Image (cartoon, rainbow, N blue to C red):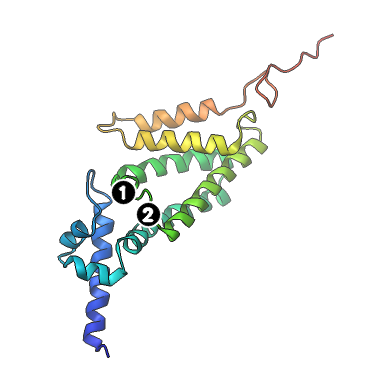
Amino acid sequence: MSTPGRRADAVRNRQLALEAATALTAEPGASLTVEAIAKRAGLGAATVVRAFGGKEPLLDAAVSGLLEPVVRRAEALLREAAPDQALRTFLAELIAFQSAHHAISDHLGGLDLPATTALRGRLVQVVEDMITGARDAGVIRTDLDPAVTSVLVGQAAYAIARTNPAPEGLADAFITVVMDGLRPVKGQDDSGRPAPSTVT
């Protein structure tokens, strides 16, 4: 039977491992191995594994903990602002988040991270909802599929976030160019072709 002292140690070790993994996501070039996390936490690798049951649950807890407020912020923006303004504001905040957590995407490929995957799905959906809302309001072009636009914007934002060193004003310039490029094109129909002339 575990004693209160052992339970307290287990809780403390879990928190130390989680904090270490979270901190490492903010370090460019950092390794997110169990050994690196254990070293940062001041624990043994076996202790870290016991605390979470393995590397994947630990990284899932760390990354989902970072993503949750990002997703909630995006959902709040969609509720509170015009869709195009929500998209503009969120892009700036997303780039800042990605710039601050370089190590995440480099180490998560092929891992089973259910909480993180669910949050990523919510994030993709809310961005598509911003784009669809802006299309419906007539402030974003309709000749591009919302899912395609979401991937285009998201991947480009990710590339900008990883630019190092980044010139001052790069993110603002990117957002301006993207939003300008998404504006409806005068004289085109929804397919992007020139609209038929109404002059007889």
> In the rendered image of this protein, does residue 43 appear above or below residue 174?
below
> In the rendered image of this protein, does residue 114 appear above or below residue 108?
below
Looking at the image, the residue that sits furthest to the front is: 110
Q: Camera-side residue: 31 or 129?
A: 31
Disc number placed over residue 107 in the picture, else none: 1
Q: Mark 2 — residue?
A: 111
Instruction: Please state the horizontal and vertical placement of residue 173, each as a whole percent of the image.
Output: 40, 28
Mark 2 residue type = Leu
Tell me if mark 1 has few (under 14), some (14-19) or many (20+) residues whose alpha carbon lies within 10 angstroms of its own: some
Image quadrant of residue 192? top right
Instruction: Please state the horizontal and vertical placement of residue 28, each as a whole percent of the image.
Output: 23, 43
Direction from residue 138 to residue 153 in the image, left or right: left
SS category of the residue bearing label 1: helix
CB atoms at circles 2 and 1 under 8 Å apart? yes
Direction from residue 2 to residue 132 in the image, left or right: right
> In the rendered image of this protein, does residue 57 appear above or below residue 153?
below
